[in-house]
Amino acid sequence: MKVTTVCVLTRDEILRDLIKTVLGQYKSIRIVDRLDPGPIDVVISEDPLFSPTEVEVLRQLVRLGCVERVADTLCRSPRTIHRVLANIREKLGVANTLQAVLWAIRMGVVRV
C-alpha cells in the first residue's frame, strides 16, 4: 500500500487538529506539520499562507537574487527583509531561505 505524505501548514490550531483527525483515520496517509526533508505528496495550507509583503519579498528575491537589492527595491532595510524571510522559514518549517524559495517556486507562489 502506497503511503501518501500530507503536509498541513496552518496557523489555526483548531483547523490543523480537525484536518489531522479526519485524515488520521486513513492508514495510507502520513501527516506532517512542516515541510519534511522527505518527499511530500500533498500540501494543505491556509489561503493565503503568506502575507502580501511576504509574497513580494519572495518574488523580488527570486528576481534580484540578494537581500540588499530586495531591500533597496522595496524601500526597506535589509534587517526588515531578513525578518520577513525568517517568518516565511518559520511558517514552512524549513532550515534556510533557499528551501523556502524552492518551495514557493514549486507551489506557484512565485514564477521564475
Image (spheres, grey):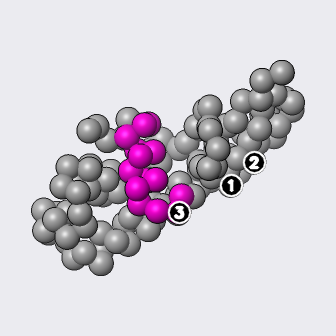
Magenta span main SS: helix
Of labels 3 and 1, earlier in sequence is 1
Left or right: where 17 falls relative to 82? right
Q: Are marks 1 and 2 in contact (CB under 8 Å)?
A: yes
Q: Look at the numbered disc 3 and give the secondary structure of its residue.
A: loop
Of labels 2 and 3, earlier in sequence is 2
Left or right: where 45 falls relative to 63? right
CA neighbours of label 1 inside 10 A, class few (<14), some (14 to 19), many (20+) = few
The kind of residue on which mark 1 rests is Glu
Q: CA distance from mark 3 to mark 1?
A: 22 Å
- The answer to whether 81 is drawn above or below residue 108 in the figure is below
* Picture residue at 13% right of the left edge, 62% below the top: 73
**Residue receiving disc 1:** 13
The kind of residue on which mark 3 rests is Ala
**Residue receiving disc 2:** 17
Residue 52 appears in the figure: no
Q: Look at the numbered disc 1 and give the secondary structure of its residue.
A: helix
Task: Select label 2 or label 3 by which is in front.
Answer: 3
Q: Which residues are magenta?
A: 94-107
* Residue 74 x %, y %: 16, 63
Spot the residue most to the top: 1
- Whether residue 4 appears in magenta in the rendering, the answer is no
CA neighbours of label 2 inside 10 A, class few (<14), some (14 to 19), many (20+) = some
The label shown at residue 95 is 3
- The answer to whether 40 is drawn above or below residue 51 in the figure is above
- The answer to whether 76 is drawn above or below residue 8 in the figure is below
